[in-house]
Amino acid sequence: MTGLKASVGSPYARILSVGSAVPSRVLDNEQMVQHIDSSDEWIRQRTGITERRWIAEDENLETLSLAAARQAIERAGLTASDIDAVLLSTVSHFRQTPALAPQLATSLGIVDAVAYDISAACAGFCYGLAQAEALVRAGQARHVLVIGAETLSRMTDVTDRATAFLFADGAGAVVVGPSETNGIGPVVWGSDGAQADAIWQTESWEGAVESGTWPALGMNGRAVFKWATGFIAGAASRCLEESGVSPDELDVFIPHQANNRITDTLLRYLKLPEKVVVARTITGYGNNSAASIPIAMESLLSSGEARSGQTALLIGFGAGLVYAGQVVTLP
Ligand SMILES: CC(C)(COP(=O)(O)OP(=O)(O)OC[C@H]1O[C@@H](n2cnc3c(N)ncnc32)[C@H](O)[C@@H]1OP(=O)(O)O)[C@@H](O)C(=O)NCCC(=O)NCCS
């Protein structure tokens, strides 16, 4: 033996396509304040949200994921047999095992795919994108389907004034594949487990069995806000630096859709010029965690506000606490 062979990948990777799917059921703020002491005006002012999408009876995490994934595969000009890895970022798959990604792969007609779930909350899509880029460049997969999907309505306590108005459902997907030029910059990512209690599941599954209480999401909104407008602003700035992109060279900014006031603060910190197109899908869709960035990307491209080939900064952040961001070329 002359030594172990190593896999040989592509010099670069890029996002080939994006797809999305949102539930059919629309809930406006008036509907949300029926169970909490709040108002349409407060929710609009403090978050930017005017309405959100929650799943209807015939929709679930799987149907949304499949719809977004099918659109992304078709738009890449590929078929199921071209995809060799499926990564699903979600915190709302309510089965500890098996993961949902292998079942999605099979439903999509992808045979023998590498398939696993990623639990990185609102940073989940950017975590998945970083892994997809690395898999393609390392030669461990050729075309990777990355799905960010959530049904957070199933984990929302509609009587909790701190969260009821915020969380929502949806799915977005991209196909990442080999490229002659670089389309995905270095990822900037990390975590801080000391802040595990900033956003959390109110009961562990064991606790839920003992108490008979279905778990919901809990959140210390002020702590998350402070972290997102402080530390995350610095991380977003590092994404630009590490990709060698100046604020003037950026075309599009797609932060996780957590709160329009967080987005405004990030914009001021990064000193992005006015010409930069900024994602604001939280207004109509709420905070749908791992789905928010690909849904926003798809929405900006299909509305014509952003164009294929433009340079976009993505940054996701959420429960863990965890974060990840990268500069990409839009598909
Ligand atoms: C949740 C969030 C919108 C709350 O806004 P906020 O300005 O921080 O609100 P505060 O908790 O400081 O409360 C401010 C006031 O609003 C009131 N308030 C809190 N929730 C309210 C609600 N749902 N409706 C009306 N009033 C509310 C408070 O009682 C307080 O009143 P006071 O000034 O008379 O004491 C905000 O903290 C936030 O968006 N945080 C980040 C959340 C996030 O991004 N989570 C997901 C990350 S993935």
Image (spheres, helix red, strand yellow):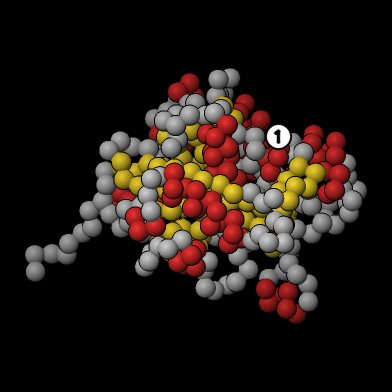
Q: Residue at x 67, y 46 (%)?
A: 287
Amino acid type of the residue tagged 1 in the rendering: Arg
Q: Residue at x 36, y 68 (%)?
A: 112
**Above or below — where is 253 with respect to 157?**
above
In x, y percent, where is residue 304? 54, 28
Residue 2 showing in the rendered view: yes
**Above or below — where is 327 with respect to 129?**
above
Q: Is residue 164 left or right of residue 300?
A: right
In x, y percent, where is residue 230? 62, 38
Q: Is residue 178 left or right of residue 245?
A: left
Q: In this view, does 116 lie to the left or right of 212?
A: left
In x, y percent, where is residue 92? 63, 61
Tell which residue pokes out farthest to the bottom in this image: 210
**Above or below — where is 207 with respect to 230?**
below
Residue 189 showing in the rendered view: no
User: Circle 1 — which element?
Assistant: helix
Q: Nearer the viewer, residue 251 or 103?
A: 103
Q: Which residue is drawn at 36% across and 52% down?
A: 143
